[in-house]
Amino acid sequence: MKILIVDDSSTMRRIIINTLSRIGYTDVVEGENGKNGLEKLGQGGVEMIITDWNMPEMDGLEFVKTVRGQNAAIPILMVTTNAAKEDIVEALQAGVNNYVVKPFTPETLKEKIESLLG
Amino acid sequence: MDQSEIDALLAGGGKSPKKPKGGKGSEPDPAPAPPAPQSAAHGEPHKDGSGHVISELDTVTAVTERESNKVMDQLDQISRLVSRQQQLITDMMRHEGAQAQGVQKAIHEVMSASKEIQDKVFEAMDLMQFQDITRQKLERIVHHLRQIHDYIVDLLGTGLKSDAERPSISHTIAQTGTTPDENKAHADAVIEAFKSQKKG
């Protein structure tokens, strides 16, 4: 399963990649922001998206809305520092399937991914 | 202090950040320059010094990200070495001379310690999330500085407004600590409520 990780922090991308590899997902592709994420998504083969919210050029919310305009089925998990109820609701309305607030534990990421894929 | 930090200080004409004086406890300056901030325009100093502060914060962000990645590199290397060690131990266990009960017990203990090291390395990697959280907190400070700067420009009717595009900021980050999953229950409850509302 190929997973697209969109986050402007290279440290955070590494942490997510590392967590994914520990739970058996090693096929990943990275994007630095929403715009770059769309390019990577356009290259095909992506079956799941993990995206941050606050990014330059195109933020996660705009990215999710654009993706949902093209693909209604792909599971999207948002991993962000935005913890307010309004933010979570806004992300869900935009088309996010599940939501993780940073900092997270590997167990949480695993649980959320499995619930999306299950 | 590396060259880009020196350049930022020279450009802004600001004060040098305090650093321990030389001697036994002092650490050498890191050699490689940090990556450029996400947009070069972010760091352009304004004559009033607000650009200088923003530039310094961008430099801090770039430096912490670079250094965090160095720590991640080291942790990756430790992880690889521990995996290699575990492989060697596994091979050793199959060796004819290692079949004695006492030897097998000792090998199992070494293996268990090795597994513990691996878990601690993974835990340390996960804790590096603090870098991104700190970065976003700094981004929020930059956002407010720019708002104050633009307000003053409007008020005085002189000067340049901030024009560089920055990442969107988190408005609730102050409530977010660095303890993992502090907000998990809250987020899960909102998701559940949203889903049941949608169903209903």
Image (tube, rainbow, N blue to C red):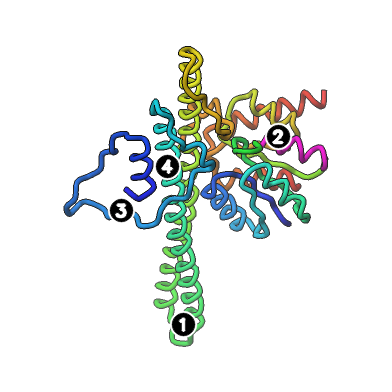
Mark 4 residue crowding within 10 angstroms, few (<14) / some (14–19) / many (20+) = many
Quick one: SS at disc 3? loop
Q: Nearer the viewer, mark 3 or mark 1?
A: 3
- Say which quarter of the image contains residue B181: top right
Where disc 4 sits, the SS reads: helix
Q: Amino acid type of disc 4?
A: Thr
Q: Are marks 3 and 1 in contact (CB under 8 Å)?
A: no
What's the mark number on residue A62?
Answer: 2
Residue furthest to the left: B23
Residue A100 drawn at (x, y percent):
61, 38
The residue labelled by disc 4 is B59
Q: Residue B174: within the magenta? A: no
Please give the range of residues in magenta.
A60-72
- Read off the residue under disc 3: B29
- Estimate how packed mark 3 is, as few (under 14), some (14 to 19) or many (20 or more) residues with alpha carbons within 10 Å: few
- Give a yes or no on whether discs 2 and 3 share a subunit: no
- Percent x, y of residue A58: 66, 37
Q: Position of residue A95 (x, y in %)?
A: 75, 34
Which residue carries the number 1 mark? B99
Q: Which of marks 1 and 3 precedes in the sequence?
A: 3
Residue at (28, 35) in percent of width and height: B15
Q: How many marks?
A: 4
